[in-house]
Amino acid sequence: MRNVITIARKELQSYFASPIAYVVIGFFALLFGYFFASLVYWFEQQSLQMTPGSGPPLNINQALIGPVFMNVSVIVLFVMPMITMRTYAEEKRSGTMELLLTSPLTDVQIILGKFLGALGLYAVMLAVTLIHVGVLFIYGSPEWKPIATVYLGLLLMGACFISAGLFISSLTKNQIVAGMVTFAVFLLLWVINWLGQSFGPTGQAVISHLSITEHLDDFARGIIDTKHVIYYLSFIVFGLFLTARSVDSERWRG
């Protein structure tokens, strides 16, 4: 486990040693701030238009926090390829892949270390949004449990993207190619539910289960369903397994 943590720390430091981490976090924070401010303004206008006795007040979790974090999932779709595209492609391009393969570290340790390093950067991105959530607690009274569950859902969804991105990055030495293919795969996982509408009720149910965003909806509503957790964990394990097979084939070719 010590080797895994060492690799993860090295990966995380390498992100911040280059502009990648700052660009990704800055881009993420800028877009999140825009969506947050827009929805806060809309929430305020809707609240002012409601007359006393006309109905229950707007629920801040359902009307504001849920939509904000569903928009976050859209941002993740764009920024995650920037995080994962260099994980193995850069090692191949710089010639350090051979050093990794001949080191006393196992493939599993290397893969888990790179996975946790990228996940650490993603966790820092999500931590930036806690500032905005803190403002809501200062001036409002949101429920904390749905907020905690949506953060859990976003973390699991991001981990799925990272595991898939690691596998794609291990297939090429070109970071741009890795980033473009990763984005294409993520986009397919995003819109696959729309494609399922033309396959009938049974086909749509199966395809909807494969959609990575469908499993986030309940987290945004404050519901932790084991079937969603199992889906995300299975996706992560499968992505890491494919990465291990790809790295192993690279070792044999080398």
Image: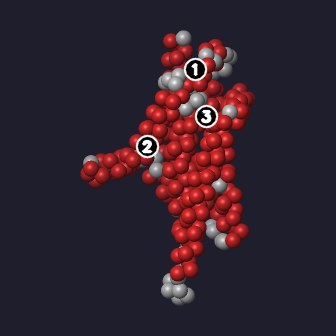
Q: Is residue 162 visible?
A: no
Residue 115 numbered mark, or none: 3
State which quarter of the image contains the N terminus.
Answer: top right
Residues 82 and 145: in front is 82
Residue pictured at 56% horizontal, 64% vertical: 38
x then y, percent, for residue 77: 50, 45
Secondary structure, mark 3, is helix
Could you say which quadrant of the image residue 188 lies in? Answer: top left
* In this view, 154 is above or below 164: below
x then y, percent, for residue 149: 59, 57
x then y, percent, for residue 142: 63, 68
Q: CA distance from mark 2 to mark 3?
A: 21 Å
State which quarter of the image contains the C terminus.
Answer: top right
* In this view, 18 is above or below 58: above
* In this view, 232 is above or below 108: below
What amino acid type should be assigned to the residue bearing mark 1?
A: Arg
Look at mark 2 in the image and give the residue it sits on.
187
Q: Are marks 2 and 1 in contact (CB under 8 Å)?
A: no
What amino acid type should be assigned to the residue bearing mark 2?
A: Leu
Secondary structure, mark 2, is helix
Q: CA distance from mark 3 to mark 1?
A: 19 Å
Graded by Cα atoms within 10 Å as few (under 14), some (14 to 19) or many (20 or more), the crowding at tag 2 reads some
- Apparent side of residue 227 relative to residue 137 in the rendered image (left or right): left
Q: CA distance from mark 2 to mark 1?
A: 26 Å
